Image (cartoon, rainbow, N blue to C red):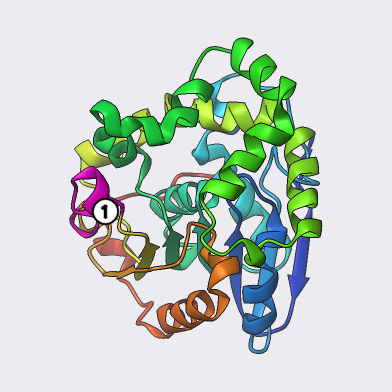
Amino acid sequence: MRVDDGVELFVQVRGSGSPIVLLHGFPQTHLMWRHVAEELAADHTVICPDLRGYGASDKPAEASPATYSKRTMARDVVRLAGELGHERFALAGHDRGALVAIRAGLDHPEHVSHLASLDVLPTLDMWDVMRGESAAVGFHLYLMAQPPGLPERMIAATADEFFGYFLDLWTRDPAAIPPEVRAEYLAACRAAVPSIVADYRASAGIDVEHDRLDRAAGRTLSMPVTVLQQDWGAQLGFDAAALWRAWAPDLKHIPVSCGHFMAEEAPGLVAGALRDLMARDAERDLAARHTEPVALP
């Protein structure tokens, strides 16, 4: 479905009822939501796209930092939902998709009724907590933050090993990602190295700038927010719930014991948390918001 000049997103839609958009993470595609989507589709319209630059969606060349900024990718999602007939919808994202969801909630609060984030911190906070030797766990963030050229060549030369490393390292239950699904993820990433790197590069530049401007202006997520997160803070020395609360006054922060790929390792837990989120009060006085919606050009 077309969302921008020369950009179409691949999308799967299931079920009927109030809409929820599910955004995948790295190194995955919309397929990561297969179990959660099946459960939610019993009484919701479930919309699962591949983000721009990933899977079967278009992968425009990185013409500028804005090409893969989370602001641009969030606009894609709002336009996609609108094309499907949904001007207001719940939104959940995992990993990279969660960063897109956060930006959509900040830029387009009139469209996002509820927001869920799975296992990330907002971009600005993510960089702030990566300090000293503990930052080694995020080596890929620094690699893909480099100027165009070298990171793309390095990753393309060992694509299956590079992307497979994260599928192995971040999974506590290997059976949650069976061989045929793993193969699909690796093939999709292998075909998208430049756009995946561009997505990460944006998060080391333009995305941080957008977050800093919002923080300085006092903008927050005005809708109900649920965060499911591994206890990174205990390992890296920060209070994840406190960091999140600065962005989301109406917050439910849920520590989880499964691995990073929680929609596949604990789909019942994730689906239940999303149902609970959508049952929370979604009414807000738009006139009282601290942010003006970002216009869709």
| Corner quadrant of residue 191 | top right
231 or 216: nearer the viewer? 231
Residue shown at 42% from the left, 26% from the top: 204
Instruction: Answer above or below: position of 226 versus 169.
Output: below
Residue assigned mark 1:
247
**Residue 118 location in percent, x, y?**
45, 60
Q: Is residue 88 visible?
A: no
Q: Picture coordinates of residue 129 (x, y %)?
A: 25, 37
**Residue found 60% across the figure and 63% down from its top:** 22
Q: Is residue 288 left or right of residue 100?
A: left
Say what secondary structure mark 1 lies in.
Answer: loop
What is the quadrant of residue 73 in the picture? top right
**Kind of residue at disc 1:** Trp
Q: Could you tell me residue 80's position as x and y percent? A: 68, 56
Q: Is residue 266 left or right of residue 255?
A: right
Instruction: Please tell me how many numbered marks the rendered image carries.
Output: 1
Q: Main secondary structure of the magenta part?
A: helix
Where residue 216 sits: x, y (%)? 20, 36
The residue shown at (53%, 73%) is 266
For this rendering, which residue is in front, 36 or 103?
A: 36
Q: Sort mark 1 into few (<14), some (14-19) or many (20+) by Cα contacts within 10 Å.
A: many
Q: Is residue 150 above or below residue 98?
A: above
User: Residue shown at 54%/56% (left/top)?
Assistant: 171
Instruction: Please report the bounds of the magenta region as a residue range.
Output: 232-242
Along the line of sight, the residue nearer the viewer: 98 or 31: 31
Quadrant containing the C terminus is top right
**As rendered, which of 53 and 1 lies closer to the eye?**
53
